[in-house]
Amino acid sequence: MNTRKDIAYVAIQFPILNEEYKYQGRLGEEITTDQGFEAMELCTLNILAQIDAKIGFESI
């Protein structure tokens, strides 16, 4: 168990927008590469929003 207080972990992020799952499917099959990049961008924005909501960017 890590007892450090200066590390934040974010595990498993889905591309969710307005409580709706976006871009469901396998890359190259049900979704295109461009849609995969859009999904990645949405996941990244969601991670940043979680960090800001939980600890705030001023804490980083």
Image (tube, grey):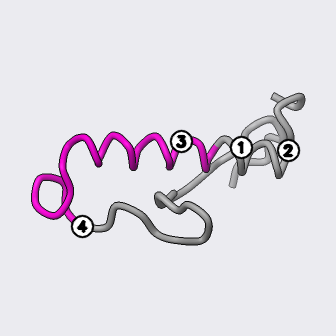
Amino acid type, mark 4: Gly
Q: CA distance from mark 3 to mark 2?
A: 16 Å
**Vertical order, 56 against 16 (above or below):** above
In the image, which is nearer the foreground, mark 3 or mark 2?
3
The kind of secondary structure element at disc 2 is loop
Whether residue 60 sits left or right of residue 19 in the image: it is right
Q: Give the x, y percent position of residue 49.
A: 71, 46
Q: Give the x, y percent position of residue 55.
A: 85, 44
Which callout, 3 or 2, points at the residue further toward the start of the chain? 3
Which callout, 3 or 1, points at the residue further toward the start of the chain? 1
Of all residues, the one furthest to the left in this rendering is: 29
Q: CA distance from mark 2 to mark 1?
A: 9 Å
Whether residue 34 sits left or right of residue 29 in the image: it is right
Q: Nearest the camera: 58 or 4?
A: 58
Which callout, 4 or 2, points at the residue further toward the start of the chain? 4
What residue sits right under mark 3 in the picture? Answer: 44
Q: CA distance from mark 3 to mark 4?
A: 18 Å
Q: CA distance from mark 3 to mark 1?
A: 15 Å
Quadrant location of the C terminus in the rendered image: top right
What residue sits right under mark 1 in the picture? Answer: 8
Q: CA distance from mark 4 to mark 2?
A: 32 Å
Residues rendered magenta in the picture: 25-47
**Vertical order, 44 against 59 (above or below):** below
Which callout, 2 or 1, points at the residue further toward the start of the chain? 1
Q: Do labels 1 and 4 touch, CB within 8 Å?
A: no
Q: CA distance from mark 1 to mark 4?
A: 29 Å
What residue sits right under mark 2 in the picture? Answer: 55
Name the disc covering residue 25, or none.
4
